Image (cartoon, rainbow, N blue to C red):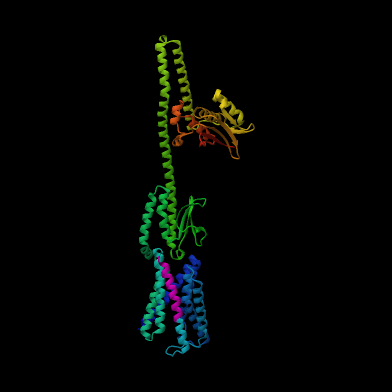
């Protein structure tokens, strides 16, 4: 049995030394507080098992005794170092830190105050026995705290991080059991074998927890890998930004057990979020993955950098795929919008042609019918009747001319073929001319409230088209008083035409500026085409402004032309 124990001791020496080498390598490649404490923890244990092989079983000389006490001190510090490794991820309560730190300091001082440790076969003094019991209790307490913290912290983590933390927790508990068994049992041969076996198991578990091989990580990650493949497939089939966000945010957060995750645009505005993101960018350990048009900001689990380096690489790759999917969805949306615009334009063109043909048919038919009547029956009609027919032809021809001019205006405005040349001109003088030309004898019904010094910067032709249409409509459809007022602010020039008529029916307001659209009141009151307001608004927008309608209280209409000052 002694030979088996010796072989196991050499195996354990190799395994624990290898664990220290792996921990030191992790510290060099990853840095960070957790990696540092892992390196210190397992380097201390490796020093104990390696140097112990060089010391005699019965240390008598000064240097041998000193080395023995230093090795025991490192054994005292091992569970404390392991506890510090767990606190690198999540701080314990201040009282717990102080209690465990104080007990470690007391046991270290006691280690150097013990008069002498007995050699093999020598009886233990009461002081040594008390020290051994305190040593085991201290080790068991610290190891229990570390085991509990690692096991509980692993719950809810991704598969690889969870299993690695549980392996380290199990290894810590196994090593503690080996120590307790060696310290408290009296059957030396059986105890030595059981202790060596437990140390071997613990060392293997420590190695697997610190650096599991790639094939093992792949097995652990298989369910998550399948979900990630499904996410990738769904991501590539998403056709809108909303679909991309819905597919990718939750899997991203689950990959690193993120507390919060946000997708932001180039200005830093949040487009979509998952989890707690209120103070996301101010949290410690936040990761930022850039995208072509923004970034993904992640607050990962504190265990992710140490236990989930592969998951962080997968998260970076998934972020890149999400960026491609977002670009693709935006291109798709732009293409769809462009297609809808083209379809709408084609629909408007067909509707415009149909309505124009319908509107043109009425005056053309009237002119043709009246002309045919004059041609066929002119000698049978008295002079008054012939005059009446010629006047009717003239009125319909005038109506036809106006309609054709309006249709030409609309076609040029739609094709953006109207060239506007803004100039500065006095507003009141021009409004007076327009009112006189449009209102004729009814100009006295129009009040002009425009300052003599007020000037506007606009294209005169566009200005005339809009204002004259508004004044004509106010006279035709409204009731006096009709009022024209203008004012210039810091950024906009406004001219308003208002009347005290019945106003526009609320249900018709959404269609007020549509082409060939006329309310029931307008149809009953005056013959028209329903193009005037559509043309007026088009001129206003071509000038960089707008034409808006506001109902007056208690009744009436107010149309306001808004133009930029510059």
Q: Is residue 324 in view?
A: yes
Q: Position of residue 235 (x, y in %)?
A: 39, 52
Q: Position of residue 462 (x, y in %)?
A: 54, 30
Direction front: furthest residue: 554
Q: Is residue 11 in view?
A: no
Q: Position of residue 427 (x, y in %)?
A: 60, 31
Q: Residue at x 43, y 35 (%)?
A: 345
Specify whether residue 145 is painted magenta. yes
Label count reads 0
- The dominant secondary structure in magenta is helix
> Magenta span covers which residues?
136-155
Q: Is residue 355 above or below residue 291?
A: above
Specify whether residue 90 is painted magenta. no
Quarter of the figure with the N terminus: bottom left
Q: Is 97 displayed left or right of 378 in the figure?
A: right
Quarter of the figure with the C terminus: top right
Q: Is residue 51 above or below residue 544?
A: below
């Amino acid at each position: 049995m002694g030979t088996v124990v010796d072989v196991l001791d050499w195996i354990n020496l190799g395994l624990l030394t290898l664990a220290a080498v792996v921990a030191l390598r992790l510290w060099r490649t990853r840095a960070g507080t957790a990696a540092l404490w892992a390196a210190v923890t397992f380097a201390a244990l490796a020093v104990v098992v390696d140097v112990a092989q060089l010391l005699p079983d019965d240390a008598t000389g000064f240097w041998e005794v000193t080395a023995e006490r230093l090795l025991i001190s490192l054994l005292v510090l091992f569970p404390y170092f392991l506890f510090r490794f767990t606190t690198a991820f999540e701080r314990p309560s201040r009282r717990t830190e102080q209690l465990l730190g104080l007990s470690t300091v007391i046991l270290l001082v006691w280690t150097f105050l013990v008069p002498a440790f007995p050699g093999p076969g020598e009886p233990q003094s009461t002081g040594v026995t008390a020290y051994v019991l305190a040593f085991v209790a201290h080790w068991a307490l610290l190891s229990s705290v570390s085991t509990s913290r690692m096991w509980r912290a692993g719950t809810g983590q991704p598969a690889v991080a969870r299993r690695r933390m549980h392996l380290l927790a199990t290894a810590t508990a196994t090593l503690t059991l080996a120590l307790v068994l060696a310290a408290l049992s009296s059957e030396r041969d059986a105890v030595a074998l059981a202790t060596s076996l437990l140390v071997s198991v613990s060392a293997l578990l420590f190695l697997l927890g610190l650096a599991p091989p790639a094939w093992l990580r792949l097995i652990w990650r298989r369910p998550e890998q399948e979900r990630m493949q499904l996410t990738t497939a769904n991501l590539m089939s998403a056709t809108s930004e909303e679909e991309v966000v819905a597919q990718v945010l939750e899997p991203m957060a689950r990959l690193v057990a993120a507390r919060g995750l946000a997708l932001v645009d180039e200005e830093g505005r949040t487009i979509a979020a998952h989890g707690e993101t209120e103070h996301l960018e101010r949290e410690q350990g936040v990761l930022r993955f850039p995208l072509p048009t923004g970034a993904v900001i992640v607050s990962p689990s504190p265990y992710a950098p140490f236990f989930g380096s592969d998951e962080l690489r997968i998260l970076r790759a998934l972020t890149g795929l999400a960026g491609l999917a977002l670009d693709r969805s935006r291109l798709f949306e732009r293409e769809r919008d462009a297609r809808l615009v083209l379809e709408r334009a084609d629909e408007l063109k067909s509707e415009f042609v149909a309505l124009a043909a319908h509107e043109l048919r009425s005056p053309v038919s009237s002119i043709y019918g009246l002309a045919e009547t004059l041609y066929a029956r002119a000698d049978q009609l008295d002079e008054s009747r012939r005059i009446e027919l010629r006047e009717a032809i003239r009125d319909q021809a005038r109506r036809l001319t106006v309609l054709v001019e309006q249709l030409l205006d609309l076609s040029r405005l739609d094709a953006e073929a109207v060239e506007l040349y803004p100039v500065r001109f006095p507003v009141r003088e021009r409004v007076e001319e327009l009112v006189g030309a449009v209102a004729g004898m009814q100009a006295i019904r129009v009040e002009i409230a425009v300052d003599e010094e007020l000037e506007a910067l606009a294209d005169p032709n566009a200005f005339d088209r809009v204002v004259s249409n508004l004044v004509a409509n106010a006279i035709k459809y409204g009731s006096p008083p009709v009022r024209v007022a203008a004012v210039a602010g810091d950024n906009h020039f406004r001219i308003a035409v208002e009347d005290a008529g019945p106003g526009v029916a609320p249900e018709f307001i959404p269609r007020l500026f549509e082409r060939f659209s006329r309310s029931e009141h307008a149809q009953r009151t005056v013959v028209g085409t329903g193009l005037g307001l559509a043309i007026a608004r088009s001129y206003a927008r071509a000038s960089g402004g707008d034409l808006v309608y506001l109902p007056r209280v208690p009744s009436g209409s107010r149309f306001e032309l808004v133009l930029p000052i510059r």
